[in-house]
Amino acid sequence: MYHNDAAIRQFFKIAICVAGLTALELGVYAIIGRFSLNVLFGAIFGAVVSVLNFLALTVTVSRAADRAEGGDPGKAKAAVQGSSVLRLIVLAAIYIVVLKTTTLDPLAAVLPLVFVQLSIYITEFFRKDGEKK
């Protein structure tokens, strides 16, 4: 069975929630008087990278579920673990390079990585009882 429909629905819910939390982040920066273009660019960059990271996770897990359902759970587990390590290395490399520039606010760029986890909690909290995960 192909799990892509549910995974894509979940991805879009998370992406919308991350966008909302990023807007809230920018609002907080504006309220405390620390808003600047560096903050704006950092927040947008962080949101895009975190959502793309979640998309990569979503695709990997969906494919692994298909593979496990096809009778190869060992390869499915290895694919998810390998993807996890690769995504972590790529994220670290991206952030090391980007945060060495002065164009982006470091905190504003890193906070959206936390927003994905928060978004998962929020969407699960508001999920209806009969709705599929």
Image (spheres, rainbow, N blue to C red):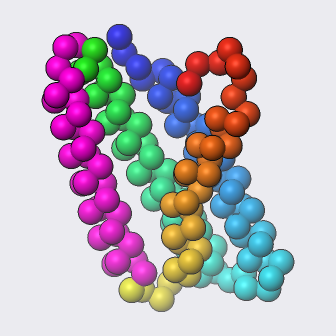
Which quadrant holds the N terminus?
Answer: top left
Q: Quadrant of residue 132?
A: top right
Residue sitting at x 24%, y 54%: 86
| Magenta span contains residue 84 | yes
What type of secondary structure mainly makes up the magenta span?
helix
Q: Nearer the viewer, residue 24 or 68?
A: 68
Looking at this rendering, what residue extends furthest in the bottom direction?
102
Looking at this rendering, what residue extends furthest in the right direction?
31
Q: Nearer the viewer, residue 114 or 95?
A: 114
| Magenta span contains residue 6 | no
Left or right: 2 with respect to 115?
left
Residue sitting at x 52%, y 80%: 106
* Range covered by the magenta-colored residues: 70-99
- Above or below — where is 1 with respect to 132? above
- How many discs mark residues in the rendered view? 0
Can residue 16 be seen? no
Residue sitting at x 49%, y 50%: 51
- Above or below — where is 40 with respect to 17? below
Question: In the image, residue 120 lies at what x, y percent?
Answer: 59, 43
Question: In the image, residue 40 lies at what x, y percent?
Answer: 63, 73
Question: In the image, residue 66 lies at what x, y percent?
Answer: 29, 19
- Above or below — where is 50 with respect to 108? above
Left or right: 6 with respect to 77?
right
Can residue 29 be seen? yes
Q: Nearer the viewer, residue 129 or 15?
A: 129
Residue sitting at x 32%, y 36%: 60
Which quadrant holds the C terminus?
Answer: top right
